Structure formats: C-alpha cells, structure tokens
Amino acid sequence: MIAFVIITVLALLAIRYITFWRGMDLTDLYHDKPIFFGHRGDRHNVPENTIASYRSAIDKGLNAIELDVMLTKDDRLVCSHNFDLERETNGTGFIDEIDYQDLVRVKTGSQFPPAKQEAIPLLIDVATSLPKTVLINIEIKTKSTFDLKSAIIIARLVKKGEIPQKVIISSFNPFAVRMVKLFSKSTPTGYIYSKTKHFRGIFIARPDCLHPEVELITDKLIQFCKRRNMCINAWTVNNVYTRNWLIDKNIDGIILDNPHLAENLN
C-alpha cells in the first residue's frame, strides 16, 4: 500500500512537472514588438553566420540577429549552421572533429566571390564585435539527442556575463533547451520545431519562447502560448504577405532572411 502511494505521488509530481509550467516574463525584450531577427545575419548579401553578416543586418536597421553555434573538437564555440564544412566553405571534414586552430584558415561563403568570403567566427568574438543593445538568438546545433555540452558551455558564458547582449538560447533539441535553463535559470530559452509531431518536445524543453516554422502557426497554437506565457518567434519569413499576417496575429518575433522586410511597415 505504501509503495502504491509513493508511486502515485511520484507520478502526479512528474505529470505536474511536465504539464504545468509557464514561460518567464520577457516584457523587457518584447516591449516594442514585433522584433525582427536577421536570420544568420544578412545571409543573402554576406556569407551567413559571420561577423560581417551580423553587422550588415544591424546596419540595415535590425535590432536582433539569429545565429547558429556548435563546438569544435577542442570545445570552442563557433558560428556555423552546418557541421559539414563542404556545404558552405572551402574546407573539408566536420567542425566537431577539427580543432579551432585548424578552422582559422577556412573561409565560409563558398557561393560568394573569394573577396567576399569570411572566416568562421568564435561566438565570443561575435559578442564583443556587436553593439550591446542587439538581441541575439543563439541556436544550438547538436548531432544527437544527448549532445549537450554546447548548451552547458553557453549557459555558463551567459551566466558569467561574458556575452554582454541580451540573448535567447534556442535549439531543435529539447534536451539542450532544458539543459540551458538548468544551468542558467534566468536565461530566456526557445524551442524550435518544423514538424507538428515534434511539438511534444515542448514538454521536455519547457521554454520561454516557441519558435515554430511559420506554416505551423495557428490560432490554437497562439492561444496555447498565451496560456503558457510563451512568446512566439516565427521562421523563416521571406515575403511581405506573411510578414503582415504575423503582425496582424500579434506575433512577438519574426525571423527573416531579408532585412528590408522590416521596412515600410505602415
């Protein structure tokens, strides 16, 4: 009988933990919404996920950027969307299998003329290069469900104040999102998903923001996020019609490839 009671209590506590939670108050971030995030910077005009790309987006009027990070073999956080160097750079191999010193010579932006190609930056160098007033959405890239070292390192960097900007730490990996919150309770987090079946990851991530692909946004989802006090950052928005629809829906953040879509809102 005692064992049954204990198991029941534990089960109820687990259900409560998974089911009943609310995002932290992010009024200070979203007081003037929508916030427009430059997706990997200004990626159509400058090699993505580079300091030049982030600066270009800011110079064109954006006050927030989205960037991707992953760890090198020697645990340095660099900005890149792909582990495979051959997809975007003049290098070969995989970032997580290479020490940072061997990435220094690699240039990214292989679709651009050589003169416009850029180095793969360290996250810490990006933070020191950008204005402190910029909001940075840092997306953690992982190779597996329990690839969580990046999340721990980023959470510690933010907690120690080594990234001076306000940040949102996000990932497709709900365990990475949860790990950030466990190591830095006051750091805003976001859970990203692109398929309806992955929505349930939200109950593991327990994020402050939801980052759905724009096609997945419905009135029902918006109401769910309101009940949970979660902000919504939609991606990736590349036309005026979708931008205006999101504004009409009072969506908090809009992640876009073209900074000019943030202009001429009236």
Image (cartoon, rainbow, N blue to C red):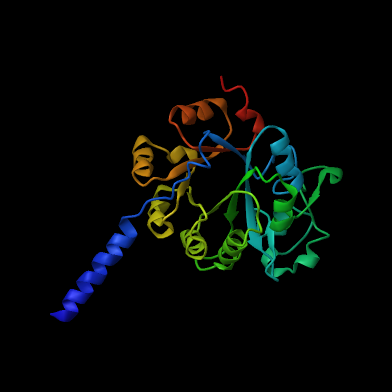
The residue located at (41%, 54%) in the rendering is 202
Measuring from the top left, give residue 243's x and y in whole percent: 53, 29
| Residue 25 visible in the displayed image | yes
**Pick the front one: 58 or 145:** 58
The residue located at (51%, 68%) in the rendering is 146
| Quadrant where the image shows the N terminus | bottom left
Q: How many marks?
A: 0
The residue located at (47%, 64%) in the rendering is 182
Q: Residue furthest right?
A: 115
Measuring from the top left, give residue 37's x and y in whole percent: 60, 40
Q: Residue furthest left?
A: 1
Measuring from the top left, give residue 6's x and y in whole percent: 21, 76
Q: Is residue 55 above or below residue 121?
A: above
Q: Is residue 2 left or right of residue 101?
A: left
| Quadrant where the image shows the C terminus | top right
The residue located at (44%, 48%) in the rendering is 195
Q: Is residue 82 left or right of residue 11?
A: right
Measuring from the top left, give residue 141's x and y in whole percent: 59, 58
| Residue 88 visible in the displayed image | no
**Pick the front one: 142 or 179:** 179
Q: Residue furthest bottom?
A: 2
